[in-house]
Image (tube, rainbow, N blue to C red):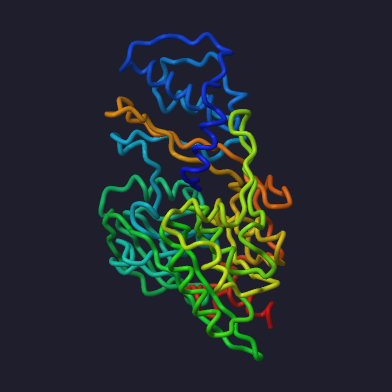
Amino acid sequence: MKIYSLLFLAFILLSCNRIEDDYDRPYFEEGTTESVNLWVQDSMKRYYYWAASMPSKPDYSLPTKAFFKTLLSPEDRFSGIIDKNDASTYTKSARSLYGFDYSVLQQNGKTFAITKLVMKNSPAQNSGLQRGLIITKINGTEITAGNKDQIESLMTNSASPMKLTVGSWNNGNIVNINNIEIYQSFTFDQPLASKIFEKNGKKIGYLYIYNFQNGLIQALLSKFAEFKSAGVTDLILDLRYNYGGILASSTALCAMIPSGISGNSPFIIYKGNKNGGEVKLTFAQQIAYEKSAPGFNTLFNQNLGLSKVYILTTASTASASETVINNLKPYIQVVQIGEKTMGKDMSGWDILDQRKPPKISWQLHPMIYKLFNAENIGNYSNGLSPDIPVNEFETLPIFDLGNPEETLLKKALQTIN
């Protein structure tokens, strides 16, 4: 979850000239591993939420990625570091390499992976992979109870193309088995998907949001204009696979849902280390971090004026999408359906060498702020628990997202009606 320049500037003003001198700062020749690690330590001492608990005399001779890990708090699950000149330091996943996601299940004595997400215009989709297909083998290696924890490694360390053996679920059996090959490539921003259901005199808007990427706000505004014009009375937000993104975008979404808010209504509280302090922002202030975003009043013109919202979640719901849940609660009843969320109640920004030209290619992404809502409620690092627990794989086969028979959406529609 990234925060834009105004908050960054506020932090700089607070922290300027205040790197603590509570350790004997060594000197290392520029260009050495030790000098790079010293830069890492200085950056972390200024920004890192748990800076006070960092070791004062770390081993500067360690490789930089290993050195970075020695600075992290045991509570920290999300801070990371990459070398922009070394692709091997980047985090790999089936999503990032191939454009799909999956879950490993055990049913009827079988262990397999089920394809739960296939991104639009991705290598996976272009190769014929579909949501709901069962994966039984990866490059000829059968998925078993013994290797189910190594599936991600099998996928991400596979040479391109990756070969999958897939089939369909039919009454407890896997049928129509065939092989497909997926090449590694980029997958770009995902579109919003929406529907309007009519039942028992109600018009129910459904909106699937893959993530809160930069530039999403205008698309959100258009969708809510459609909902408002159609007279939508209930809203279902599908955030089940949403890892987060730009807080300005998630705040803009929130601005178009509840009644009784204004641009000056408090939305979020950031709590950092002694340098960062505490920063409180209204709806309008947080949205303004995206320079191209419409103003709060433009967004509020499409506000649905609801008193309740239904949000679909899984363990892949994280960061800015969790903020939607937590930070709407002071203003509206949130009915969370599905599974407990990931528990990323923090935010940060990328830290890199600002010299021109830069002399250090490493880029840090430390956790800098804990996030709280207008009522000062946060600390959900263990995840946000659903009001209505539902396993999206409780019945197989699974349906496409947006299908009213799909498990989580079906439960939301039943709850509304």
Q: Give x and y (percent) for residue 217.
A: 46, 63
The residue lying at 64 percent from left, 54 percent from top is 267
Figure check: 39 above or below 407: above
Question: Count the marks: how many?
Answer: 0
Task: Classify residue 310 by image quadrant.
Answer: bottom right
Direction bottom: furthest residue: 201
Figure check: 216 above or below 81: below
Give left or right: position of 281 versus 213. Answer: right
Q: Give x and y (percent) for residue 365.
A: 46, 37
What quarter of the picture does the C terminus occupy?
bottom right
Q: Give x and y (percent) for residue 289.
A: 49, 51
Q: Nearer the viewer, residue 270 or 192?
A: 270
The residue lying at 55 percent from left, 12 percent from top is 23
Figure check: 224 above or below 103: below
The residue lying at 52 percent from left, 68 percent from top is 298
Give left or right: position of 339 versus 95. Answer: right
The residue lying at 48 percent from left, 53 percent from top is 246
Task: Classify residue 29 by image quadrant.
Answer: top left
Q: Nearer the viewer, residue 119 or 206?
A: 206
Give left or right: position of 360 versus 329. Answer: left
Q: Nearer the viewer, residue 217 or 407?
A: 217
Task: Classify residue 316 by image quadrant.
Answer: bottom right
